[in-house]
Image (cartoon, grey):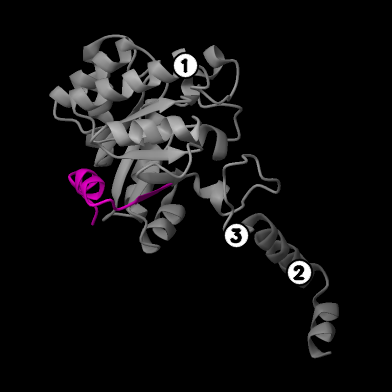
Amino acid sequence: MFKLNDFQAYKQNDKKISMVTAYDYFSAKIVAESGIDTILVGDSLGMVFAGNENTISVTVDDMIYHAKAVKNGAPNSFIIVDMPFLSYHSTLAKTIKNAGKIIKATNCNAIKVEINSEHTISHVKALIDAQIPVIGHIGLTPQSVNIFGGFKIQGKTTDEANKIIGFAHKLVEIGVAAIVLECIPEQLAKTITNQINVPTIGIGAGKYCDGQVLVFHDLLGFEPNKKYQFVTQYANAYGYLTDALKNYKLDVTQPKLQFIENLG
């Protein structure tokens, strides 16, 4: 089983880290049996599981419900759970309370926090001081979609790049276990990966990160049309499952015809 200190060990030994999202019992079971290192219960469930336009509406209770199901499906996996929008933005006490609620209710191994300001960094430090393991998340932080004006690549200008690099170094200083880099230029991800001594986990950030994370439904092709250019689809689950259901309907509605065809 992957453990918290394995993040550092993998970085030191130049070993890549695999991470995939899961939102329910069966997807977690599949991911665990495949040997993936870590599972992320992402607030992306608001989009992938519930069909919303963004992650803003996801609550702490939503995260707990899905994380408990994932833990049931993958009891021996290293599980990371997202802190949802506004669950870590007010007071330090409320931030610790919300994170503690998630940890205690789900028995997960770490939480992930999106970083978009010095304010959130101070809250991450409070969590780590409270003995709660944290994975940082910088670059395109989906909870800030309204500020960014959409899901856009971050770090393309010098100022943006320097800001993201600064966040990375500050997160390392306060003790995060790893940092997710989302939708930033490949060379910027390479610079950050080379400069810091904790692993980077990329999603749309190129090949130089210390590991990669993808959404379960994206990499298995649950969407009929590929949404993101950086996602490699390893299966066509949408087509396969649709065909299976069509065959089931045919068996139900035209059983004699199906029987004759099978004999032929």
Q: Nearer the viewer, residue 83 or 101?
A: 83
Q: Which SS class for mark 2?
A: helix
Q: Which SS class for mark 1?
A: helix
Q: Which residues are magenta?
A: 1-20
Tell me: residue 254, above or below residue 51: below
Q: Is residue 251 left or right of residue 96?
A: right
Tell me if I can see residue 193 in this picture.
yes
Badge 3 density bin: few <14, some 14–19, many ≥20, Cα 10 Å: some
Question: Which numbered marker is on residue 235?
Answer: 3
Amino acid type indicated by mark 3? Ala
Tell me: residue 63, above or below residue 59: below
Residue 149 place in picture, x, y as percent: 60, 15
Question: Which numbered marker is on residue 252?
Answer: 2
Q: Is residue 137 left or right of residue 147?
A: left
Question: Which numbered marker is on residue 3?
Answer: none
Residue 177 place in picture, x, y as percent: 23, 36
Question: Which mark's residue is nearer the viewer, 2 or 3?
Answer: 3
Q: Which SS class for mark 3?
A: loop
Identify the residue under disc 1: 158
Q: Nearer the viewer, residue 73 or 212?
A: 212
Residue 143 place in picture, x, y as percent: 47, 21
Q: Quadrant of residue 74?
A: bottom left
Estimate the spatial distance between the alpha carbons at disc 1 and disc 3, rounded to whole Å: 38 Å
Q: How many marks?
A: 3
Estimate the spatial distance between the alpha carbons at disc 2 and disc 3, rounded to whole Å: 27 Å
Mark 2 and mark 3 lie on one chain; the one further toward the N terminus is 3
Quarter holding the C terminus is bottom right
